[in-house]
């Protein structure tokens, strides 16, 4: 089979594409984490105005398709390179979803603990940093793994603005061989499966080690 | 004392690297961003991490004779014209056809190639050039290409009964043709030739129904004065036989035509109106 030989000879390019996909993934998850956490904290602990802005922003980002946001960010009047544009666009999208993961995790910290902390004279920032966030992190690893794998797959959209990741490499091969579409996409599918499986494996391990006693966990 | 020496050495080293790196960039030729769609053989494509193709090689030559360098920026076709008009890239190469509509948003150098359009049908199809594009036939074309526009403006708008189907890529159209959901597909000749040579289940039945000028595009207003350089580079490439060499290498089935150096785009477009 000719195509297998071609795919093997293109493996270094797929490796490069994978690295770029992982770079975009790391960037967008980090951006989404920071912004998502800020939105979640603002929605729970903020005053009316802050709450209003945070909720509006979250709903806005929630509602826009990633593809639209990608083109939107790419064509902003700054000189953004494709990788940066992809990280910003996908990161903004992810922040809406991550904020809800964190919000759920924060709200599942029992209110008795917060009242106890208040009774001991802890200030609000101290309660957030010492009581809420440590538990929130442990509780959100599970749902966050889901976000991780869904964003890993969404990096495949980044090729539309010129990020040469796995999908783009696949398109190159399809273009110059004038066919073999199914074989190439099957290979790409297997590649994404491996990446997702390896990534989630580590998060499952982490979740197991850090689970909060008394809460449910993955069996 | 020893620490001081070390620090001074460090500072000197830093200065030296900065100095030499600035020297290196100052002495170099200007570098322009050449926007390509690296999935578009034979014009430009990426194979095993290397960029190849007619346009890529021609630009290496033009850069050499005109004194500039190009750096490839790969952008998918759907976004490439907007990227040029917004100045994200300086030059657009890769089988771009001149159209009066595109001329409104970007500037063009003189044409370097004349592309004709072919109509493909399935290998065992009994359709001919006329029946494949009339009588309610399903005709496909890549959306946004001049072929698509020709089908619409020259055939459908003049009362020919066809259903035009637009596809994001030619590959999708070929697949539909092979599956029998399309009667014919209208494609530019280099791409059509590629699919036929790759032994796909298609054949051509019409050639040369209409022509396109392929020309390189530059950012609107031409801020780097590239049109002049590209035009003179193409002229030199033609005179030195470089074009002939590239045609033989990348488009071996095509004949080397005398290149229409001078096309008055403005006149052409006002006549079309």
Image (spheres, coloured by chain):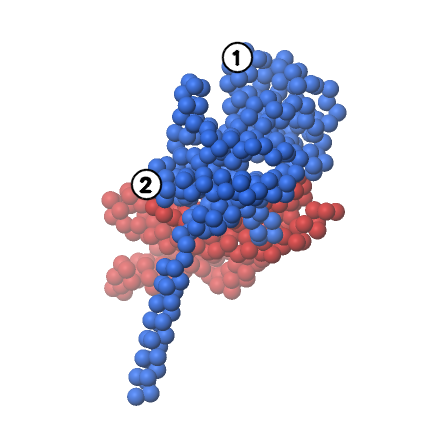
Chain colours: A red, B blue
- Side of B255 relative to B28 (left or right): right
Residue B38 placement (x, y as % from top left): 54, 44
Q: Residue at x 34, y 64 (%)?
A: A130
Q: Residue at x 44, y 36 (%)?
A: B109
**Residue at image mark 2:** A56
User: What SS does tag 2 mark?
Assistant: helix
Instruction: Give the farthest residue toward the top.
Output: B159
Q: Residue at x 49, y 61 (%)?
A: A211
- The chain identifier of the residue carrying mark 1 reads B
The mark lying in front, picked from 1 and 2, is 1
In which quadrant is the C terminus of chain B drawn? top left
Mark carried by residue B158? 1
Q: CA distance from mark 1 to mark 2?
A: 51 Å
Residue A19 visible in the snapshot: yes
Dot 2 surroundings within 10 Å: few (below 14), some, or many (20 or more)? few
Q: Are marks 1 and 2 in contact (CB under 8 Å)?
A: no
Picture quadrant where residue B123 is located: top right
Name the one closer to the observer, A160 or B215: B215
Residue A99 visible in the snapshot: no
Q: Is residue B152 above or below residue A142?
A: above
Is there one chain holding both mark 1 and mark 2? no
Residue B195 placement (x, y as % from top left): 66, 35
Q: Residue at x 56, y 49 (%)?
A: B51
In which quadrant is the N terminus of chain B drawn? bottom left
Name the one closer to the observer, B164 or A46: B164
Name the one closer to the observer, B118 or A101: B118
- The chain identifier of the residue carrying mark 2 reads A
Instruction: Give the farthest residue toward the bottom.
Output: B1
Dot 1 surroundings within 10 Å: few (below 14), some, or many (20 or more)? few
- Side of B92 relative to B205 (left or right): left
Residue A182 placement (x, y as % from top left): 66, 41
Residue A51 placement (x, y as % from top left): 29, 45
């Amino acid at each position: 089979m000719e195509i297998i030989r071609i795919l093997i000879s293109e493996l270094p390019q797929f490796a490069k594409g994978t690295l770029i996909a992982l770079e975009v993934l790391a960037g967008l998850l980090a951006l989404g984490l920071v912004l998502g956490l800020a939105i979640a904290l603002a929605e729970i602990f903020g005053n009316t105005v802050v709450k209003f802005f945070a909720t509006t922003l979250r709903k806005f980002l929630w509602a826009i398709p990633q593809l639209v946001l990608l083109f939107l960010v790419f064509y902003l009047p700054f000189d953004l390179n494709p990788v940066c544009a992809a990280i910003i666009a996908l990161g903004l999208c992810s922040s809406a979803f991550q904020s809800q993961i964190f919000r759920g995790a924060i709200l599942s910290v029992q209110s008795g603990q917060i009242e106890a902390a208040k009774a001991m004279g802890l200030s609000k920032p101290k309660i957030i940093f010492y009581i809420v966030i440590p538990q929130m992190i442990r509780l959100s690893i599970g749902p966050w793994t889901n976000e991780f794998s869904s964003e890993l797959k969404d990096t495949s959209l980044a090729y539309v603005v010129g990020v040469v990741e796995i999908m783009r490499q696949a398109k190159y091969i399809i273009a110059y061989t004038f066919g073999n579409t199914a074989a190439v996409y099957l290979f790409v599918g297997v590649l994404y499966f491996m990446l997702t499986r390896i990534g989630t494996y580590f998060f499952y391990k982490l979740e197991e080690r850090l689970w909060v006693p008394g809460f449910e966990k993955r069996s | 004392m020893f620490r001081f020496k070390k620090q001074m050495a460090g500072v000197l080293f830093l200065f030296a690297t900065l100095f030499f790196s600035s020297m290196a960039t100052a002495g170099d030729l200007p570098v322009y961003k050449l926007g390509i769609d690296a999935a578009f053989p034979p014009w430009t494509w990426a194979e095993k991490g290397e960029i190849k193709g007619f346009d890529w090689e021609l630009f290496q030559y033009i850069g050499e004779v005109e004194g500039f360098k190009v750096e490839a920026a790969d952008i998918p076709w759907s976004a490439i014209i907007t990227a040029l008009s917004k100045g994200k890239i300086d030059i657009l190469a890769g089988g771009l056809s001149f159209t009066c509509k595109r001329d409104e948003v970007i500037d063009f150098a003189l044409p370097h190639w004349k592309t004709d359009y072919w109509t493909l049908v399935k290998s065992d199809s009994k359709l001919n050039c006329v029946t494949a594009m009339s009588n309610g036939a399903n005709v496909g074309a890549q959306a946004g290409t001049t072929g698509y526009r020709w089908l619409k403006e020259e055939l459908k708008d003049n009362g020919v009964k066809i259903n035009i189907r637009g596809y994001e890529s030619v590959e999708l159209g070929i697949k539909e043709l092979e599956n029998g959901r399309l009667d014919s597909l209208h494609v530019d000749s280099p791409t059509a030739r590629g699919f036929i040579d790759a032994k796909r289940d298609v054949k051509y039945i019409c050639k040369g129904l209409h022509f396109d000028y392929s020309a390189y595009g530059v950012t609107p207003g031409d801020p780097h004065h590239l049109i002049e350089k590209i035009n003179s580079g193409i002229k030199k490439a033609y005179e030195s036989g470089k074009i002939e060499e590239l045609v033989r290498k990348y488009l071996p089935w095509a004949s080397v035509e005398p290149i229409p150096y001078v096309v008055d785009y403005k006149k052409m477009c006002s006549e079309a109106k």
